[in-house]
Structure formats: C-alpha cells, structure tokens
Image (cartoon, rainbow, N blue to C red):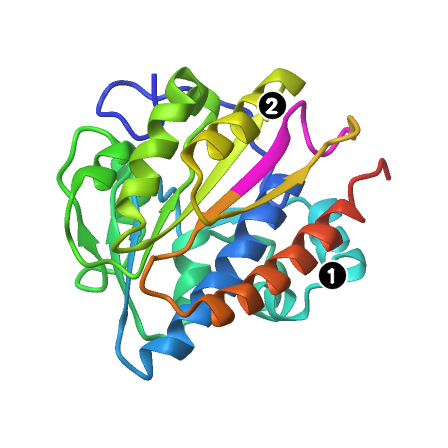
Amino acid sequence: MAKGSRQEPKRVRYNPGNLGDLLKHGWLVECVRFLHRLNEGEPLRYADTFCGFAEYDIAGEFAERIRERFHAPTFRTLQEPFLARGKYAGSVTLAGLAAEGRLRPFLFDTNPEALAGFPAGHVESLEMQSGFDILETGEPYDLIFLDPYDDIWDDCEGVLARAAARSRGASVLIFLPFRAGAQEETLAAALDRLGINCLTGTVRNPGSRLDGRHHFATVLMPAAALNPGAVLGLFGELNIVTARVKALAAPF
C-alpha cells in the first residue's frame, strides 16, 4: 500500500539520519532557502503530502556522522539543536527553519499521530485519498515535496508525468528510494521521454550496516515561471549536496 494512501501503509524499517535522509533533506533545505529568498518576505506555500513526524529519535552513530563527516553547514546548523537532544528534525520542521519561520505548510499523512505532532493552528491539513493527489490540484503552492516509499515504482512514469505537468505552476521535489539498477534506468528513461527541465541526484548505497538496502534518488522539477539563470544557481547548490552525501556513502 502507498505511504500516502488512506489504506494501511507499508511498515518499513527506518533509521533517521540515513543517507537517503541526508540527500532529500539536504536538497529540501536548499530549495526552501532559494524560494524563500525569491518570496521577499511572503510566506512560502509548502505542500508535504507524505510528511511524517515533526522529529524522530536518532541513534548516536547517525548523529555523529552528521556532525563530523557531513559537510553541509546550513543543514548541520539547522539540525544541531535536535541532534543535541538525540533527535532528528523531519521535513516540515526543516522547511520551516530554512524559511526562517515564513512557511505556510499544507500537510497530509496516513498516520494521524504524525499530523497530531504539529502545533495546532500552525499547519493546514489536506483532505485527500493519496499523497499523490496533490499533483491533480491547482492550488498555488511554491513547493510540493513528495517523499513516498518505494511503491512509487508501481507507476513511476505516471507520477513523474503528473509532477511535470504540475511544475508549470509549482516546483516539485521528489524522493525515490530504489533497490535495483533497472529502477534507476527506468527513472532516467522516463525523465528523458518527458523532456522537462529537471535535476536528478543519485546516491548508491554500498551496503553499509547503517543505511539499509536501498539506493536513493531525488528529482527537482522547478516551476516554469522561475528565472532560468537563478535555477541554474540552485542546481549548482544541489549538486554540491549530492556530492557531499556521496562522500559519506562508505561503510564506517
């Protein structure tokens, strides 16, 4: 079952602060900072429809790796108060910090306990059947973040096509965990067929005991209205994040 579906979601083993988290959240922080600057003080409309919890418990070895080996200063600065008390900030919390408190979050998750963890009155809950339904709406979001489980591969090209259409009005950031090289090839081929302006970052997991069995990919489809030169600058920052996560992709 899909993580963002009203049906019972998959139960997956999850270690907060893993390579996938660092990739997707490193990209998320840079995207939010970029859009926040463009908004010139206006609240950033942020939709996160697989939002998870505001924060998670983090094991000491993951926290140590972030502090000592992950050379992404802004991300580390935002996470440090959480790491200091054995926690890891989730996507919505990080986005709010990156936007310097000027975030207007629109959230959905299948787990009511996750949504209950956000302060009442500070977020808007979305009514939908699946987290992917956000791609069918016409609401004027600045950024849509999709962080489903690997069942996105059930209809990967369909999701990407819908996201590409949605990016005419909103930037769309997608996280795709994958296990097989064939899935990575499927992603590349689908994006090539769509022929859209996007950036992909991929980190292959060498099989470290910390990071599970998945490899990780992110795709950013910037909103069509954004200045192409500015977007190229953002792409450069995202490529730096990817390179720094790759530098961690080795067994301890």
Say if 99 sits above or below 2 in the image: below
Query: Real-space Cα distance between discs 2 and 1?
Result: 33 Å
Quick check: can you spot residue 100? no
Q: What x and y, as percent, mark residue 45?
A: 26, 63
Q: What x and y, as percent, mark residue 123?
A: 22, 58
Dot 2: element: helix
Q: What x and y, as percent, mark residue 211?
A: 69, 33
At label 1, the amino acid type is Arg
Identify the residue at horizontal 75%, vertical 63% (top origin).
Answer: 71
Q: Count the marks: how many?
A: 2
Q: Which residue is mark 2?
A: 185
Say if 190 sits above or below 90 in the image: above
Q: Nearer the viewer, mark 2 or mark 1?
A: 2
Image quadrant in which you'd find residue 119: bottom left
Reading the chain from its start, which is encountered first: label 2 or label 1? 1
Which SS type dominates the magenta stretch? loop
Highlighted range, magenta: 209-218
